[in-house]
Image (spheres, rainbow, N blue to C red):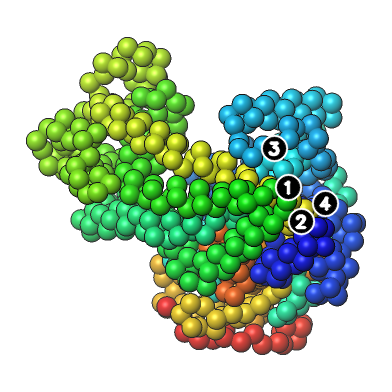
Amino acid sequence: MTWSHRILISFSIASLSFADEGMWLFNRFPIDTVKQKYATAVSPEFLDNLRLATVRMGGSGGAIVSPAGLLLTNEHVVAACLAALSTGANDYLQDGFYAASPAEEKRCSGIEAKVLIGMEDVTAKFPVPQKKVAASQASERETVIAGLEKECAAHAGETCEVVNLFSGSRFELNRYKRYTDVRLVFAPEQQVAFFGRERDSITYLRYGLDVAFARLYEDGKPAVTPHFLKWSNEDLKEGDLVFATGNPRTTVRETTAAQLTFYRDTLLPLQLARLAKRIAALGEFSAKSEENQRRADPQRVVFLEEYKSVAGKLIGLRDDRLVLRKTVFDGKIRRAVEADTKLGNDAGKVWDQVATAYKNWAPSERAYQILEAEPAPGSNLFRLARALVRGQKIDANLDIDEPLEIAFLTQYLEELKDLAEHGGPRGEKDKEIKLKEILGGQTPQAASEAFVRSSHLQNARDRRQLSANPDALANSEDGMIRLAQLLEPAAQRIRKKHEEAILAVDASAAAQIAQYRYRLFGDAEYPDATGAPRVEFGVLKSYTDRAGVNEPYAATFSGMFYRRNNQGPYQVPDRWIQAKLSLNEVTPLDFVSTCDIGGGEDGAPTVNRVGELVGIEFDGNLESLPNTYLYTDDQARAVHVATEGIAEALEKVYRANGLLKELGLGVTSTAQSAARDGRQISSQTHPLH
């Protein structure tokens, strides 16, 4: 293939992507694209300051907003800290927290923040990727990674991490400055931070003040942070260009059309059906008493969140345009690969291998989900039992609620019964499942009661004894241990089958396709997300959702007060009721953008053209979930908390004048606020339910 031919093919393929698509590395940002589309020059200094003012906090993020280490993130990122700091006299989750002076700032044990201070291309230190990924090659890579990270940390005294990009086509060594002393400064009531609770999660319109302030400390003093993000004083407008950062979790955009078809027709529908049954079972359990409802509510929220996430992905994949677009894209990439004389026609067969593997595997997916991938959802006792049987590390903090355990296990035994009797690839009996020994002639309900009530795994001492004594474990009469042991042969069989049929193909095929794409595009394409820092760009943009409702680019304070009856998940805290008349209700509280974010960007900053902070990310809408597989900006939106709304709440509701002063914000009168925000944002007054 000639160079000019490759360029033409690259442009043809690139035309299938969307203008705001991409989770870009800071040192590979598409400056020319942004300049051409938005007439905005993005300088290296702009990107450096944005990177050095962004922190990584576990799987989430935050923004440094003052030269004295003040940090802005989401309330849910520090929720565990709020709970740990609470006492009988002070419930900081319920009532919020504000340290009016540095002496009142409280340390969050277990929370640390990291700032990306350096990136180095270390690809030359790794073996050249082969067409087929062998176990020895993967092992060699891990050895090189461990050596580089150790050498880096020892030399620089920093935290270092090697990032695998384009499935081994490129490797980068990231260096981080680490802050281990993080202290809480401010958090609102959880009722307003998680306004609407699970009903509104992963949706839009949103009215959540999901924010918290903390401070970075070094040597017992507030950290000196010369790189910080200045608070913007400009009003948000439709069409504004913004830049977002974060640590997006794994995306699978190198997935083939055949894999998407498998997810759409097999994997996701199975997951959805299993979740629906458990949600229904919890509903029946909760209806029996208020106490049952209290017990079931935390797990019900988890199941509902997961159900909404899976459903959103499935709805997206059932849009034929998405799979068609992927099919066309695959075809263009494949033809480009086959036209490359250095690769040849055989190189294109990787797409056929993937399609065949997933087609053959599909009848076994249900057994895999039930026996291995997600056995006994909700049952912490079974999680403990399986971990002990497999010699794995156990979670000592799992809560055990016997009535709930019986409900969850009953559901699971009913699944096992149906799988054993009708779950073979052609609907025949699955003889690997020892159904007679598991049920012992009882109903799933009676058998689950026997297993749970004869178990002592809720006792930490018993768990430690079993973990330390393989003979005692093998001969244990504990009901849950016996159940895990009875299921282990069938689980091991289906796991091995999955490894051979799917994981092996995924490893080799994904690597080959990623390497082909990198050969075509080079650094003009962004790599799949890996949980490492990225930067994105997009615009504030209204849209029409799947129900045909026109959604505005911003949601204002007024939406918090016209929810029906001000109760349940839409109950506004008392101090907000008292402050209502002083609030400028057309001030944006949340807004949406076309930024190509993913999970893991919670709390990370969003800035305008000049690098000033305009918001922080905290969610995506339901239509954004299929972006895991393929980006589209038709309806998918990132959801941000607006700095305008944060400032309005700090001043009018919380009277946090010290915090406002540190942010460089003056206190305004109600009349001044109303005059400044005389704009109107459409679709803000229609009734919500």
Instruction: Read off the residue under disc 3.
Output: 129
Q: Which is nearer the N-term, disc 1 or disc 4? A: 4
Name the quadrant of the N terminus.
bottom right
Residue at 58% x, 29% y is 135
Question: How packed is label 2: few (under 14 Cα within 10 Å), some, or many (20 or more)?
Answer: some
**Whether residue 376 can be seen here:** yes
Residue at 55% x, 81% y is 544
Label 2, label 3: how far apart the Cα atoms are: 21 Å
Relative to the observer, which residue lies in front, 601 or 630? 630
Residue at 24% x, 33% y is 432
Question: How packed is label 3: few (under 14 Cα within 10 Å), some, or many (20 or more)?
Answer: some
Label 3, label 1: how far apart the Cα atoms are: 15 Å
Q: Quadrant of residue 50?
A: bottom right
Q: Is residue 243 left or right of residue 485?
A: right
Amino acid bearing label 2: Met
Residue furthest to the left in view is: 441
Q: Secondary structure at mark 1?
A: loop
Q: Quadrant of residue 57?
A: top right
Relative to the observer, which residue lies in front, 336 or 461? 336
Where residue 593 appears, x then y in whole percent? Answer: 66, 71
